[in-house]
Amino acid sequence: MNVFVGASSFVVLFGLAIILLVFSTPFRELLPGYGDNDTKQNLQELLYKTDSIEKSLREKDIFLKNKINILNGGEGLNDSLYN
């Protein structure tokens, strides 16, 4: 029984030591979902820039379609940015 208790205690303490080692050192960056803060901030900036570029592209596409419509004899859109 003493061997079982000793082995169990060793396994639990070894597991706790590994967990503390991983979460208190840069090893945690190797785990999924635990990236460093710089990477997360860069990702946020890239997402914001991508969204801005997509919005600008949609607005320019609507503007060009409106110009083509007017040049082909159409009346154009009332408010080209919101249609």
Image (spheres, helix red, strand yellow):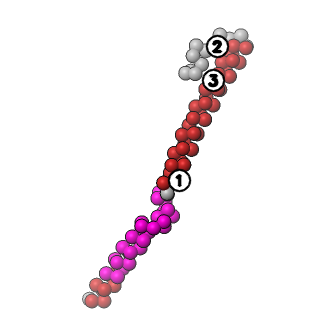
Which residue is depicted at the point 65% across and 10% down?
A: 75
**In the rendered image, which residue does mark 1 sit on?**
39
Asked whether, in this view, residue 83 is left or right of residue 64, the answer is: left
Helix, strand or loop for disc 1: helix
Which residue is depicted at the point 61% across and 26% down?
A: 59
Q: Specify start and end residues of the magenta stretch as a single range.
A: 9-35
Q: Amino acid type of disc 1?
A: Thr
Name the spot of residue 76 as percent of width and height, x first: 64, 13
**In the rendered image, which residue does mark 3 sit on?**
62
**In the rendered image, which residue does mark 2 sit on?**
76
Asked whether, in this view, residue 18 is left or right of residue 43, the answer is: left
Asked whether, in this view, residue 16 is left or right of residue 35, the answer is: left
3D distance between C-alphas at marks 3 and 2: 11 Å
Q: Amino acid type of disc 2?
A: Gly
Tell me if residue 1 comes above or below residue 40 in the rendering: below
Q: Nearer the viewer, residue 41 or 81?
A: 41
